[in-house]
Amino acid sequence: MRRLRLFSRSGRTAKGRRRPASRRTRWIRRLAAAAVLASTVTAGAILSWHAGWPAIVLDSVQRAAETTLAKAGLRVDQIYLKGRRQASVKEVSGALAVARGMPLLSVDLEAARQRLERLSWVRAASVRRAFPDALRVVIAEWRPVALWQRRKQLVLIDDEGTVIPHNDLEGFSDLLVVVGADAPAHAAELMTMLAAAPEFEKRVDAAVRVGGRRWNIRMDNGVYVWLPETGASDAWSNLVRLEREHGLLEQDLVAIDLRFAGRLIVRTREQVSPQKRKRADGKGGRT
């Protein structure tokens, strides 16, 4: 929100005009006046409560006090927003429902926080006042790291394996697709392993979780890499080294089997029958 500058004048110049007071002096005066007003309103509210005044009267007194304090300088002049990446500024502004010039004390911080957290990209939010004239809004958005294929549909998941409640997948086609009931829970660990070799990571097309124990990696040329249940990172590092030295993935292969420590088994298209070739994607539960 664009900052609105407030001006006041105090002190006379040699020509009879009042010399502008410093910004600090103006705020001290306004805050002092606001403190006096707040004390008066609080005392009045207490007396009204003891006198048994109805709630509508107390609300009216409170609104009048907030308006008076706003005139003294306690009004929303700026909003500082931190953490926004995916959610649009329009969505955030609409959820806040705060207009410039609104009395700062009349902003319902909890209600604003709840509205923000109903936005599809917002995981958590906080809203607080920054006296005398601002709100500070911090949002933590979901961080999509992969697409999870479940029931023949794709959904976004974050780095903690949580499904992101966002249906528009446009713009996320470059994310890795993971398959398997427990794939989201292990996706972050897989992504860390793949990121160790960025140029190789780009060639990974999908990852299938097999039996809740290990991964089968499908490369962009259709070759499958069968990783072991334990020591997957070491096996992957060895494969990266072999690819750099010998161009292993450029061979006419169907699968590279790394499930056995210290061994690398390659399966060529000539060695694999059409039926077995269909199972090379790791969907056979006993691979």
Image (cartoon, grey):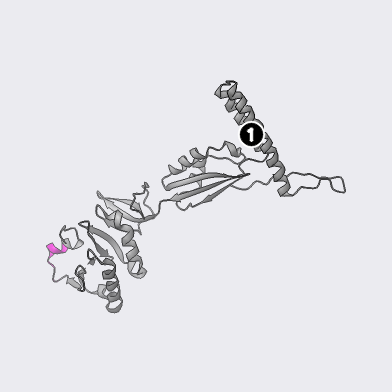
Residue farthest to the bottom, as pictured: 245
Specify the segment rendered in magenta: 270-278
Amino acid type at circle 1 is Thr
Q: Which residue is at 35% across, 66% downward?
A: 195
Which quarter of the rendering shows the C terminus?
bottom left
Image position, residue 252 (x, y; %): 21, 73
**235 magenta-colored:** no
Q: Which residue is at 23% across, 61% downward?
A: 214
Q: Which residue is at 52% across, 44% downward?
A: 127
Image-quadrant location for residue 278: bottom left
Q: Which residue is at 33% across, 69% downward?
A: 200
Image position, residue 33 (x, y; %): 70, 38
Vertically, is 251 above or below 224? below
Is residue 207 found left or right of 93 in the rendered image?
Answer: left
Task: Give 253 or 46, whichever is nearer the viewer.
Answer: 46
Q: Which residue is mark 1?
A: 67
